[in-house]
Image: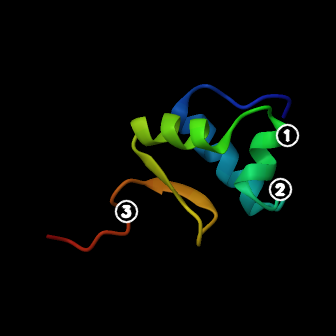
Amino acid sequence: MDYLPHDPAILVSSVNMLLRDEEFDTLEELCYNFNETPEHLKSYLHQAGFVYSDSQRQFRPIGFDSAPG
């Protein structure tokens, strides 16, 4: 992969795959490789409904871990 996709759904899938398959050890390392900042990536995906989980090392839908009402 030469660049990160712009479509939020494909971007989440790509980033999570690269972290899961241990292509990169951290989100920061991944971002550095693609000339991106973690803050910008987190902000962009937050607007699309995703939040980064440090403990899971992946982006997840906002509210995914919330207990029901």
Contact (CB < 8 A) between labels 1 and 2? yes
Q: CA distance from mark 3 to mark 2?
A: 24 Å
Q: List x then y, in percent, for residue 21.
A: 79, 60
How many discs mark residues in the rendered view? 3
Q: Which quadrant is home to the N terminus?
A: top right
Q: Quadrant of the C terminus?
A: bottom left
Q: Is residue 5 left or right of residue 3?
A: left
Sequence-wise, the earlier of marks 3 and 1 is 1
Residue 59 has which mark? none
Nearest the viewer among 50 and 42 is 42
Residue at x 73% of width, y 62% of height: 20
Q: How is the image coloured?
A: rainbow
Q: Are marks 3 and 1 in contact (CB under 8 Å)?
A: no
What residue would you read off at disc 3? 64
Which amino acid type corresponds to the residue marked 2 in the rendered image? Answer: Phe
Q: Tag 1: residue type?
A: Asn
Which residue is depicted at the point 68% across and 38% down? 37
Q: Nearer the viewer, mark 3 or mark 2?
A: 2
Rendered image: mark on residue 33: 1
Report which quarter residue 23 is drawn in: bottom right
| Residue topped by disc 2 | 24
